């Protein structure tokens, strides 16, 4: 019996809570606004005003709900007074706009809604003139754009490639240059203070002072504003090449025809050679008598061997005189040839030096990749 009574109490409590929840929901600002909107649309203006009064006194009413409650109250008064804006309806519109300046009249409030909408917009412009309306500043993204020549030919000595970073707001700009195949090794960098004018300029050299070599290089640009915010890094690829130097060709080597003969070959020996041959012949004829061997000349056979030898030597001396030659130096030609060789070597050395200087001073071409031929 006791258990049955407890169950009945529980059921009654649940029902009471459900009724209370339904009543509370029916009294909520959102439900009352929906009901008031329907009443205004149906022409029940007094009922709509009665439905809205508790909304103004409810602590849970939000500014947007309060604004719409004033809007429906103004619409009910406006329609009840034959679409004439009275002081009271005007006051309701102003209160609605003060609670929420962005409130708009419902399109389907009733068939005469354009009339109340026009009144709303007229009072909105009076209360919030366009020039007095708060301006919402657009959030400008923090970016930096590097300005540079798309294709430049610069002298290697004294030439400078300009890079002008332009941040979207006041900031300090940074520039760094690396090889494309070694992005972690920075060999040139610079910075431009905020509000500073003029570009940064790369001197076409590595950190050790050596002239830049042909190849691809990565240029990175970013900026940091006074608040410490850093912009996204912008990368550009530069193609560096050396312009072919204007060199001189070396002259062809000197041929033998360019030189004068330094000696003269004479086809006649000196008279001393003839005298020397005759002397040897006489010595050959007298040698047997001097040795006491006259039989060599008078022998049994009587062949005259010694005289034959003497004659042969004499004839040989004469033949050497007639068929031999001698060489006579020509010092003038030797000096001329030496001067010719000296001038040729000096000319070649000067051309080699000029060509080396031209190669070292060859202009450098810096082209932005993708900028065209």
Image (cartoon, grey):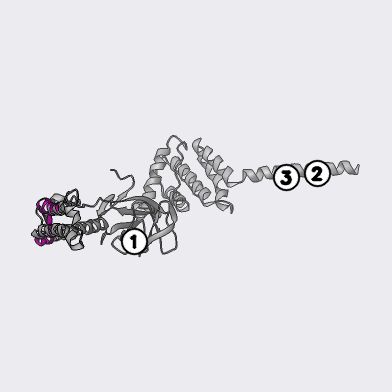
Q: Gap in Å between the C-alphas at discs 1 and 3?
A: 90 Å
Name which of mark 3 and mark 2 comes first in the sequence: 2
Which residues are the magenta region?
315-335
As for residue 327 lying within the magenta part, the answer is: yes
Relative to 187, say whether 257 is above or below: above
Q: Secondary structure at mark 1?
A: loop
As for residue 192 lying within the magenta part, the answer is: no
- Can I make out residue 262 in this image? no
Disc 2 crowd, CA 10 A, few/some/many (<14, 14-19, 20+): few
Left or right placement of residue 63 versus residue 273 in this view: right
Image position, residue 275 (x, y; %): 10, 59
Q: Secondary structure at mark 2?
A: helix
- Which sits in the foreground, 177 or 329? 329
Q: Secondary structure at mark 3?
A: helix
Name which of mark 1 and mark 3 comes first in the sequence: 3
* Residue under label 1: 210
Q: Gap in Å between the C-alphas at discs 2 and 1?
A: 96 Å
Disc 3 crowd, CA 10 A, few/some/many (<14, 14-19, 20+): few
Residue 27 occupies quadrant = top right
* Residue under label 3: 17
* Residue under label 2: 10
Relative to 62, say whether 193 is above or below: below
- Can I make out residue 234 in this image? yes
Q: Quadrant of the C terminus?
A: top left
Disc 1 crowd, CA 10 A, few/some/many (<14, 14-19, 20+): few
Q: Main secondary structure of the magenta part?
A: helix
Between label 2 and label 1, give the one nearer the viewer.
1
Q: Gap in Å between the C-alphas at discs 3 and 2?
A: 11 Å
- Which sits in the foreground, 11 or 337? 337
């Amino acid at each position: 019996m006791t258990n049955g009574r407890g169950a009945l109490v529980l059921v009654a409590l649940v029902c009471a809570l459900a009724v209370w929840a339904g009543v509370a929901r029916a009294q909520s600002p959102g439900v009352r606004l929906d009901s008031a909107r329907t009443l205004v649309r149906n022409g029940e203006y007094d009922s709509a005003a009665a439905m809205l009064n508790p909304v103004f006194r409810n602590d849970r009413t939000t500014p947007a709900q309060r604004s719409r409650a004033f809007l429906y109250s103004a619409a009910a008064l406006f329609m009840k007074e034959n679409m004439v804006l009275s002081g009271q309806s005007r006051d309701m519109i102003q209160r609605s706009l003060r609670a929420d300046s962005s409130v708009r009249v419902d399109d389907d409030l009733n068939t005469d809604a354009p009339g109340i909408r026009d009144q709303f917009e007229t009072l909105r412009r009076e209360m919030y003139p366009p020039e007095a309306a708060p301006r919402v500043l657009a959030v400008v993204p923090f970016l930096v754009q590097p300005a540079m020549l798309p294709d430049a030919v610069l002298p290697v000595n004294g030439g400078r490639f300009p890079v002008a970073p332009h941040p979207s707001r006041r900031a300090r700009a940074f520039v760094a240059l690396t090889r494309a195949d070694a992005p972690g090794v920075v060999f040139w960098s610079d910075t431009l203070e905020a509000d500073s004018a003029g570009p940064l300029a790369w001197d076409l050299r590595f950190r050790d002072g050596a002239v830049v070599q042909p190849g691809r290089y990565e240029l990175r640009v970013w900026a940091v504003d006074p608040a410490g915010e850093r912009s996204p890094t912008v990368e550009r690829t530069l193609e560096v090449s050396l312009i072919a130097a204007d060199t001189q060709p070396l002259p062809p080597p000197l041929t033998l025809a360019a030189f004068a003969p330094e000696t003269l070959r004479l086809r006649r020996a000196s008279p001393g050679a003839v005298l020397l041959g005759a002397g040897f012949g006489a010595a050959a004829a007298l040698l047997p008598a001097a040795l006491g061997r006259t039989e060599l000349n008078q022998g049994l056979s009587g062949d005259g061997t010694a005289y034959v030898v003497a004659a042969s030597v004499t004839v040989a001396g004469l033949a050497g005189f007639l068929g031999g030659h001698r060489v006579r130096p020509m010092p003038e030609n030797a000096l001329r040839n030496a001067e010719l060789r000296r001038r040729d070597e000096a000319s070649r050395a000067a051309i080699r030096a000029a060509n080396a200087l031209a190669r070292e001073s060859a202009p450098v071409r810096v082209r932005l990749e993708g900028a065209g031929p």
